[in-house]
């Protein structure tokens, strides 16, 4: 018989009529509290510096060291002639020489400034285009397959046409960048909108969110993970498109970006310079992801209680 004394341990009855003791009640409460406190615990707990070093810093350092070791061994084994396969130190000497000449940052900034400007223009075009495609069935039926086809089309295929349209100008470069990035951004936001639970949209309408208000307060926040994925892919496509355009569209009036730099070194048959340009292109791509997209993604995941799962 269960005690009715409020000062004694409470015994509850489960749905099948069996008694649940106080220890089981406390255990269930602690489990629920742990689940409820997961997000708070994940945010407040500080990761030890040693763990960060072993899980985040050490693996890429080891990978780079292995690549350099294999590269150096291939150089010593004379797998290819020296003018085709230079040593890692030869590439470092090329980078150091450009740094002393003061041209290294100039080359990088020429390409990065073009990439950022083209990417921002692509966002301004791709975002409303994606929203229209996602919400208007007739437009999706007409344009959706075209966007998918444009996304799969190699960006370098647009370079000859862009040269005929705009000549050897920056317009050609930006046209290629936009044609490469806009479809990815638009398709990203379409995918994000498609994944929104219908309940969110109905709740927004009940609360009076319609038109641009619905887009601002319901669609974009709910589609943010898919939209961010589209932005990341859009940046990758814009950067690749930019390099493809710079490889072909070469003119003294345009300045020297990383793509033009690589083509110039190829013309001079300077393999150290070609590898240097490739390394700088890769470095910019990694830096943009680490300094911009990764922190933004972590912030979004943290705001939605998904940081622990992402880690």
Image (spheres, rainbow, N blue to C red):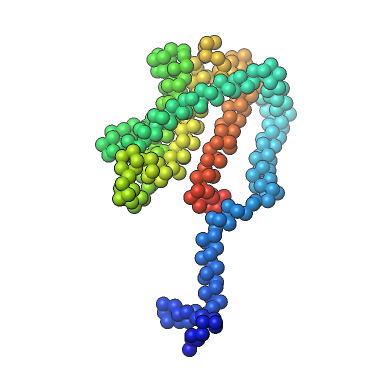
Residue 272 spot, x, y in % from top left:
66, 22
- What residue is at 54 percent from the left and 55 percent from the top? 39
Task: Give left or right: position of 11 versus 197.
Answer: right
Residue at x 42% of width, y 34% of height = 185
Q: Residue furthest front?
A: 6
21, above or below 260, in the image: below
Residue 117 location, x and y as percent?
48, 25
Query: Does residue 74 appear in the picture of this structure?
Result: yes
Viewer-side residue, 8 vs 62: 8
Residue 93's place in the image compared with 5, above or below, is: above
The front one of 211 and 76 is: 211
Task: Write the residue at 41% across / 46% down.
Answer: 222
Residue under the image location 52 percent in, 69 percent down: 29
In the current view of this chain or complex, which residue is farthest to the top? 252
Residue 14, x across and y down, in percent:
44, 78
Between 70 and 160, the residue placed more toward the observer is 160
Please indicate, yes or no, whether residue 258 appears anywhere in the rendered image. no
Give how far across and how far down residue 103 sits, in percent: 64, 18
Q: Is residue 56 left or right of residue 139?
A: right
Identify the residue at the far left of this view. Answer: 138
Which of these two is toward me, 117 or 7? 7
């Amino acid at each position: 018989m269960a005690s009715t004394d409020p000062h004694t341990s409470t015994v509850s009855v489960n749905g099948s009529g069996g008694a649940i003791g106080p220890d089981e009640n406390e255990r269930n409460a602690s489990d629920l509290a742990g689940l409820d406190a997961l997000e708070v615990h994940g945010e407040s707990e500080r990761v030890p510096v040693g763990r960060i070093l072993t899980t985040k810093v050490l693996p890429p350092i080891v990978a780079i060291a292995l690549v350099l070791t294999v590269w150096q061994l291939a150089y010593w084994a004379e797998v290819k002639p020296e003018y085709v396969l230079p040593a890692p130190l030869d590439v470092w000497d090329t980078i150091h020489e450009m740094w002393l000449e003061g041209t290294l940052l100039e080359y990088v900034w020429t390409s990065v400034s073009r990439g950022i400007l083209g990417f921002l223009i692509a966002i301004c075009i791709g975002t409303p285009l994606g929203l229209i495609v996602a919400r208007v069935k007739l437009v999706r039926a007409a344009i959706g397959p075209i966007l998918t086809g444009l996304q799969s089309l190699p960006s370098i295929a647009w370079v000859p046409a862009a040269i005929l349209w705009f000549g050897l100008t920056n317009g050609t470069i930006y046209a290629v960048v936009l044609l490469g990035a806009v479809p990815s951004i638009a398709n990203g936001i379409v995918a994000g909108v498609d994944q929104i639970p219908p309940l969110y949209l109905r709740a927004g309408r009940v609360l009076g969110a319609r038109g641009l208000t619905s887009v601002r307060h319901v669609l974009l926040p709910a589609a943010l993970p898919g939209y961010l994925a589209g932005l990341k892919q859009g940046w990758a496509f814009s950067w690749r498109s930019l390099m493809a355009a710079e490889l072909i569209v070469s003119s003294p009036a345009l300045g020297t970006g990383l793509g033009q730099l690589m083509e110039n070194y190829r013309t001079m048959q300077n393999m150290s310079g070609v590898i240097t340009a490739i390394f700088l292109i890769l470095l910019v791509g990694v830096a943009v992801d680490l300094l911009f997209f990764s922190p933004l993604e972590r912030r979004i995941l943290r705001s939605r209680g998904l940081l622990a799962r992402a880690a």
